[in-house]
Image: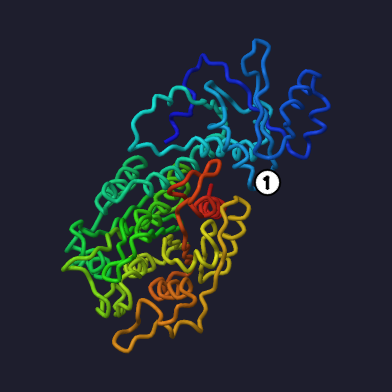
């Protein structure tokens, strides 16, 4: 996903990328030779964040690259435009930046993310060898940036693959590939075995598809280390079931496994960093399809927890499959339990596409995720598990319904549903996210996106790292 921008030619002499702090531009400019001042003036470069300028060398080639930045949480994106803006050649961040590890890490991450491509289904345009190459210094900041970038890239790639090539079996294959890379154990409970091993809700939702549903289970690390459990919604395609979505709403439903992509990307970061934790990843992987075997509105479903659920709407399937996975996750009493899911349109209405909704039964965890998210420019915003709304999930025929009869507070209602099954986990957070960029921005192309996992990784690393 990034190899096309990484410089591998040791004989190449990199062109330096010189970051200029926006606030210090005038003082920097005053110290430059007259020819440089004239060139900068002629090109109207003012050192504003995210802007670039090529400076000519003595031989007429590019001598160096200037990039304006502000040293804050958004600095990543100040550097993300460079891979697409630079002409062919080899470039490197200036040597004096290596003493500023935090800024170097942000700059390197921006360069990686700016070079992200998803071109699996496109013919080779012959331009790969003509793109800018980046040579990063052999320092820890660069290695940390690469780890985070590869976790984000994995999440993006998984979401971007269309459902014809990313069904439950392919999602399992991706988890097994990741497990093999880091020596993790990966298993799966598939098809009718879900009933035999008491995961009835996952089976019921996925039974409507010809592609067998499954629960994917990855474990890694010392069994005696702090337990970190990640649960990701893996609905590989969502038609809505018998409560069928309109065609316009179905166009992006390959991304409904975005929660599973997040937890695999986050798991990659944790394992690559060799954090001293016991990691478990649970992914209920299904398709929500229409068929003679598909579940129906008003059906009453069994769950692993023993709670019966009346189906008020078959398009609220994500919370149903998560119920079994959360029940299993909570049964181990992990030190931290995080679930990621593209769960509700209501969360998008409330907070927009770029700000995932956060719910938690633990103020310390919620505050930590929010504070870290803001510091990393990977924001999350807490909404309440509002107790007064719990009665809206009441059912006259079963222990609970999967939806409310009210059109209001949908994200909270969904989180309250999950809360019934995460019961017993002392520190649980639910992240309801979009997992998609609707338009291009530097480092954030249209398509699948990782949201919240940089924040989660940093928090886990700070709390449980070496």
> Of 4 and 247, which appears nearest the observer?
247
Q: Which residue is mark 1?
A: 72
Quarter the N terminus occupies: top left
Q: As drawn, is 65 to the left or to the right of 189?
A: right
> Of 344 and 432, which appears nearest the observer?
344
Q: Work out which residue is located at the far bottom of the displayed protein and give it.
A: 396
- Residue 134 visible to an observer of this rendering: yes
Residue 174 percent across, percent down from the top left: 31, 46
Secondary element under disc 1, as helix, strand or loop, is: loop
> Of 421 and 23, which appears nearest the observer?
23
> Of 381 and 364, which appears nearest the observer?
381
**For residue 127, which quarter of the picture?**
top left
Residue under the image location 35 percent in, 70 percent down: 316
Number of marks in the rendered image: 1
Residue under the image location 29 percent in, 87 percent down: 397
Question: What colouring does the structure picture have?
Answer: rainbow
As drawn, 345 above or below 302: above
Residue 343 percent across, percent down from the top left: 41, 65
Residue under the image location 60 percent in, 50 percent down: 376
Residue under the image location 67 percent in, 15 percent down: 57
**For residue 63, which quarter of the picture?**
top right
Residue 207 percent across, percent down from the top left: 20, 65
Residue 191 percent across, percent down from the top left: 19, 61
């Amino acid at each position: 996903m990034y190899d096309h921008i990484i410089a591998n030619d040791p004989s190449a002499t990199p062109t330096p990328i010189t970051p200029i702090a926006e606030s210090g531009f005038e003082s920097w400019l005053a110290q430059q030779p007259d020819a440089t001042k004239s060139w900068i003036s002629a090109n109207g470069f003012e050192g504003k964040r995210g802007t670039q300028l090529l400076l000519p060398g003595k031989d007429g080639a590019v001598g160096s690259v200037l990039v304006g930045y502000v040293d804050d949480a958004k600095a990543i994106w100040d550097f993300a435009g460079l891979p697409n803006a630079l002409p062919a050649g080899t470039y490197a961040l200036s040597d004096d930046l290596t003493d500023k590890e935090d800024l170097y890490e942000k700059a390197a991450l921006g360069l990686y993310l700016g070079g992200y491509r998803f071109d699996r289904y496109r013919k080779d345009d012959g331009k790969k060898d003509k793109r800018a190459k980046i040579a990063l210094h052999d320092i820890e900041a660069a290695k940390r940036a690469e780890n985070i970038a590869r976790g984000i890239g994995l999440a993006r790639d998984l979401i971007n693959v269309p459902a014809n090539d990313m069904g439950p079996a392919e999602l399992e294959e991706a988890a097994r590939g990741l497990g093999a890379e880091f020596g993790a154990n990966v298993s799966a409970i598939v098809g009718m075995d879900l009933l035999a091993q008491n995961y009835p809700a996952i089976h019921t939702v996925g039974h409507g598809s010809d592609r067998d549903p499954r629960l994917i289970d990855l474990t890694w690390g010392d069994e005696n280390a702090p337990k970190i459990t990640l649960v990701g919604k893996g609905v590989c395609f969502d038609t809505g079931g018998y409560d069928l979505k309109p065609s316009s709403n179905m166009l992006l439903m390959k991304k409904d496994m975005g929660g599973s992509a997040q937890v695999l990307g986050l798991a990659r970061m944790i394992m690559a960093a060799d954090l001293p934790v016991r990691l478990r990843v649970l992914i209920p992987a299904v398709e929500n399809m229409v068929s003679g075997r598909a579940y129906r509105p008003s059906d009453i479903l069994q769950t692993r927890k023993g709670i019966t659920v009346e189906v008020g709407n078959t398009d609220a399937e994500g919370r149903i499959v998560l119920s079994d996975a959360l029940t299993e996750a909570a049964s181990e009493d992990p030190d931290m339990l995080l679930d990621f899911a593209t769960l509700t349109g209501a969360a998008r209405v409330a907070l927009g596409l770029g700000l995932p909704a956060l719910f938690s039964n633990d103020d310390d965890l919620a505050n930590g995720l929010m504070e870290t998210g803001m510091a990393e420019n990977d924001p999350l915003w807490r909404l309440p598990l509002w107790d007064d709304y719990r009665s809206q999930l009441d059912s006259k025929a079963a222990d609970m319904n999967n939806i409310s009869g009210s059109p209001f507070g949908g994200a909270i209602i969904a989180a309250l549903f999950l809360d019934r099954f995460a019961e017993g986990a002392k520190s649980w957070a639910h992240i309801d996210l979009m997992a998609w960029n609707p338009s291009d921005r530097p480092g954030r192309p249209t398509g699948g996106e990782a949201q919240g996992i940089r924040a989660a990784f940093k928090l886990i690393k700070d709390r449980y790292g070496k």
